Image: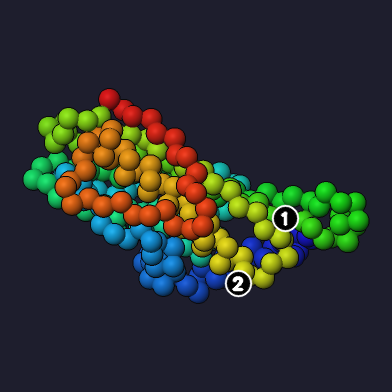
Amino acid sequence: MTSLKRYLLLSGVVLSLAACSTGPGVDEANMSAITTNINAPYYVNAASVSIESRYNPLSDPKDISGTLTVPLDTAVKEYARNRFRASGSEGIFHVIVEDASVFLDHNGSSSGMGQFLGLGNEDKYTAVVKLGLFRDSSSIGPGAMGTTLRAQRSVSMSENVTLAERDAKLKEFVTELLGDLDKGATDAILNSLKLSAPQGDYAPSPGPYPPTPVEAAPIQ
C-alpha cells in the first residue's frame, strides 16, 4: 500500500469517527453494536461506582486508538458505566482505565509475486487494555484492595478491505476484547475483591471465539 493510499485510508476512518461521534458524548448506535452482549448490570457491594480514565492517547505516537469509530478508551468507559452498578451501603468501587492503546502493523505478502502485485498484504491491529479495579476502604469487604487487569487481542485483515468492512471488523474486534475484559473483571470482583452483590450476573462472552486470557495482578 502506498503512503498516500494509507493516509487516505486512515483519514477516512477519522472522518467516520467525526461523522458518528457527537462531541464529548457517545454515539449510541455504535456503542450498542459493541456492547450489546455485555449490558446486563453486574452489581457490586459498594455505595457508588466511580469510572475514570488515566489513559493518554498522545503518550505514544504509534497509538491509533483515536481512529476507531468509537475510541477504545471510550468503549471501555461506557462498558464499565453500563455494566457495574452499586448495590451496597458504603464505600466507592473505582474503575480506572490505565491503558487503551491500539497499534497497527502492516505485513507484506509472503509470496514474491504477491509482493510484486501488491496483493496479500495485511493490516494487523493489536489492542491493549489495562484496567484497575479498586475500592476506597477495606471496611466494605474482606477481599483484596484492588486488582489490575490487562487484556490484549489482535486481528488481521486485508489492506484492501473497504472502509465499511474495516469498520465492521474493528467493531467486532472491540466487542470480543470487551468480552475478555468482562470475564476477567467479573472473576476478580467475585473471587479476589469479593465485592459481588447477590444479584450480580455473568454475561456470555460475545463473538464466535473463546475468550483470550486476561492477566490479573491483585493488590493486597
Residue 27 visible from this viewpoint: no
Residue matched to label 2: 164
Quarter where residue 215 is shown: top left
Position of 89 with respect to 15 (left or right) is: left
Q: Is residue 97 above or below residue 1?
A: above
N-term mark: 2 or 1? 1
Q: Residues within 10 Å of mark 2 (few under 14, many from 20)?
A: few
Residue matched to label 1: 122
Residue 198 visible from this viewpoint: yes
Position of 44 with respect to 83 (left or right) is: left
Q: Is residue 149 above or below residue 41?
A: above
Residue that protrudes farthest toward the left in the picture: 89
Q: Circle 2 sits in a helix, a strand or a loop, which is it? A: helix
Position of 109 with respect to 53 (left or right) is: right
Q: Give me the residue at 44% from left, 57% from top.
A: 206
Q: Position of residue 185 (x, y in %)?
A: 34, 43
Q: Give me the residue at 33% from left, 29% from top.
A: 218
Q: Quadrant of the N terminus?
A: bottom right
**Label 1 near label 2: C-beta < 8 Å?**
no
Q: Nearer the viewer, residue 183 or 84?
A: 183
Position of 1 with respect to 216 (left or right) is: right
Q: Give me the residue at 31% from left, 44% from top.
A: 186
Q: Is residue 82 above or below residue 128?
A: below
